[in-house]
Each structure stands twice: as C-alpha cells, then as structure tokens.
Image (cartoon, rainbow, N blue to C red):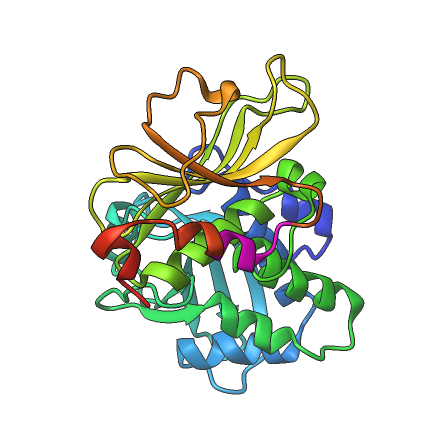
Amino acid sequence: MSETNLFTMLSAYRPGSSATPFEAYCTSGLAYLLGRGHRMLTALLGQAAGAYNEPLAITEVQCDVAGGGIADLILTFEGGRRALIEVQVEPAADLRAVDALAEASRSWTDPPALLLLTLPGEPGLAGWTTVSWLEVAEALDRDPDAVAQEFGEFVLRDILGLGDVPLEQALATNRLYALGGAAVRRRFGDRARYVNSASRPLGGRYRYLGTTFSVDGGEMEYWVGVVNETVPLGEHYQLMLASRTRAVDAPSDHPRATGDWKWGHWTGVGRVVRPITPDAVDALLRRVRGDAGRLNQ
C-alpha cells in the first residue's frame, strides 16, 4: 500500500489481526508519514533493517504474511530490502502471534528484517531488532512538516504518556492511559505490568477510567485513575488509587461510583479541577505501602 492519503491509512484496520484499534491507528499514522517520505524517520527504520541510506519504495499496512498472520507494517526499500514491523503500544504483549509471523516470513525468497517497535525499556526478542517509540519521536523532532510535528506530539503524549492531561482529554483519548502507564513504569521499573481499565461509558461519562497494574510482574493488585464522584453519574471526577488487599497511605472512603468493586483500600487527591499531571499520579503511587512501594525509589 503506497497510498499516502491519511484517511485511507487510518481505515486500514483489519479485525482479523491481533492489533487493537488504537495500535492500528498508531501504525497507520506512522505509515502515512513514511509514505510521505520523511527522511529521518525512514533513516531510523532503514538503519534498523540494514537498508542504510536507501529511500523507501513501498509501505504496506496490515498485510498477510504467507498465511502466518497479519503483519502490522511491511516496508520495502529501493534496494529490495524488506522489513516486517510488529507495533506495540502496551507492555507485555502476547508474542505468540509474533513468533508465527517470524516463522512464516522465513518462507520468503529473501526473508525480511524483523523489527519490534515498542515502549522504552521493554525486553527484546531473539531474532528481532528493537526500536522504541521514543526514537520515533526524536526522529520527528524539528521536522518542519506540520503533520510530522503533530504526530511527534501524539507519540510523546498519547503513547509515551508525557505531559499533562485535561479531564476532557482523559475521558476521550488514550492520554490518561498513557500517563498512568508511564507513571507505573517510572515508579516501579521494568517488572511492572499494567492494562487499561474502564467502565462502560454511559452518556459519555464513566464510573472509573484508568490503569490496573502490578508492581512486580505478579497479580495486578492496584489501580490508578479517575472515579466519578456521584451516582447517578455526574461531570466531576476524583483522581484515586485503589488496592485490592494491601493498605495504602492516606486512606479514603470507598467511592460510591465503584460500589460493586470489592477492592478494600482507596486513597485520593481530590476532585480533578486542573489538568492531571505526572507529578499528581506519582504522588498517588507513592502511597503504595511496604516493599512494593520502594521497588524503584
């Protein structure tokens, strides 16, 4: 797919793939910029693929690989070198599909380079070259193209979780999830694992929205995010931390909007009236008690 129409790229998601819609959205945005010939971004991926200083000839999104699965992105450089790229926007992704893609690609006459595009600090995978989203953002830094600048900001804020998040963005975009995940990684290190967690929206409002996480790779015993203040649901939310079984510092009452959520320990920093900051989430994570709270101090 050499098409560089942004809307065509963003519509390329295939339900049969293992990608989430958000992951596919990120992949298509990346493909769009590559199709427009952004030099530093092409150079970053070309170097990782062993295609040094070669222009990109073909950009393909969501491609079947010899019946072995759907590749997020396949690049073909002018010298003939190809790169199969697995895109990840969350930690601890299921790698079974990745193994199947690698095995299927070996049937090609000229097997491709295998690239893993991940969050910073994620473990590598044998046979794959790792490129981080932070490197993508750095490649787009100072690019004079306005679309490249916007995508660079999107990578930093919506994928890497850097920067403040106003409440309206927290409720409507990936930015609160990214902010929570980044705070968990920063506080608890490489062993931390997390997933996005939200109630079903009712009229655009949520009972809760945030990040369920483990501090040590074990059971996911904690959650951090925003909780609606009232029942019936209103427009006000509080920033809170919950623990399934362990006590937390500065405990508060169980919020009404999560009355059916049987986790025993809650703490908060009050109503969200200003943009949610990394420091505010960090302050909540410091209320995790005991050895768990000291893992990455």
The residue at 64%/36% (across/down) is 171
Residue at horizontal 51 percent and vertical 19 percent from the top: 256
In the displayed image of the protein, which residue is found farthest to the top? 232
Residue 294 location (% of width, % of height): 28, 61
Q: Residue furthest front?
A: 250
Seen in the image, is 32 located left or right of residue 45? Answer: right
Look at the image and give the residue range highlighted in magenta. Answer: 276-282
Locate the C terminus and report the quarter of the image it occupies.
bottom left
Identify whether 258 is placed above or below 65: above
Residue 72 horizontal/vertical position (percent): 46, 52
> In this rendering, is residue 198 above or below 178?
above
Point 62% across, 32% down: residue: 237
Is residue 112 positioned above or below 255 on the image? below
Q: Looking at the image, can residue 129 be seen? A: yes
| Quarter that holds the N terminus | bottom right
User: Is residue 280 in the magenta section?
Assistant: yes
